[in-house]
Amino acid sequence: MQPRLSFITLGVADLDRSKAFYNDVLGWSPFQDNGGIVMYKLNGMVLSLFPQHELMEDAKASEEATGSRFTLAQCLRSPEEVDTFFAHLKQHAATITKMPEKVFWGGYSGYFADPDGHLWEIAHNPFLELDADGDVLGMVTG
């Protein structure tokens, strides 16, 4: 199987509340919104919001299967861009779990949570090579 990711679907408690956060706070526009699922086209993949109980039913999983066991991350081009983004989050009273700071691996990052507690890391990784669209090309060498 090829190593790739096409969709990330987040189970959410309140679809309208989560949609408002992603639309109004993050400034994203859905490319699909049929009232039951909301989809955002990212750089080569899709992030969708789906009611948690329906996601668990579809997956035939226990409703207790909640909580974040992973983080989603977006890399920006500089520590200043990270700080600017966190200033924006503060203006919208978003839940910031860790303000940006220099981190042990040589980068600069902070974390925030969406309304359902899904953790997002916003980082500047000086070792990551990005193209003009922000897509990851690889690691900086030499």
Image (spheres, rainbow, N blue to C red):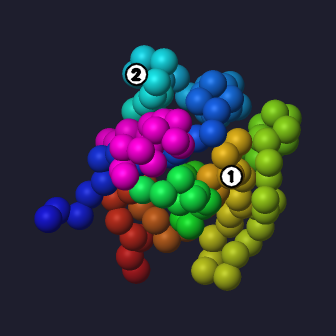
> Image quadrant for the C terminus?
bottom left
As drawn, is 96 to the left or to the right of 57? right
Query: Residue 83, image x and y in percent?
Result: 76, 51
Q: Residues within 10 Å of mark 2 (few under 14, many from 20)?
A: few
Decide which of 24, 52 is in the foreground and name it. Answer: 52
Magenta-drawn segment: 43-60
As drawn, is 25 to the left or to the right of 50? right
Q: Amino acid at mark 2?
A: Gln
Query: Residue 109, image x and y in percent?
Result: 68, 63
Q: Earlier in the sequence, mark 2 or mark 1?
A: 2
Residue positioned 42% across, 17% down in the render: 34
> Decide: marks 2, 1 in contact (CB < 8 A)?
no
Looking at the rendered structure, the secondary structure element under dot 2 is strand
> Image quadrant for the N terminus?
bottom left
Q: Which residue is mark 2?
A: 32
Decide which of 127, 38 is in the foreground and name it. Answer: 38
Q: Amino acid at mark 1?
A: Gly
Decide which of 120, 51 is in the foreground and name it. Answer: 51
Query: Residue 2, image x and y in percent?
Result: 16, 62
Residue positioned 63% across, 25% down in the render: 16
- 18 up-or-down from 139: above or below: above
- 59 up-or-down from 126: above or below: above
As drawn, is 123 to the left or to the right of 32? right
Q: Which residue is mark 1?
A: 117
Residue positioned 52% across, 42% down in the render: 53
Q: Give the quadrant of residue 5.
A: bottom left
Q: Residues within 10 Å of mark 1 (few under 14, many from 20)?
A: some
Quick check: is 5 in the magenta stretch? no
Quick check: is 49 in the magenta stretch? yes
Query: Residue 74, image x and y in percent?
Result: 54, 52
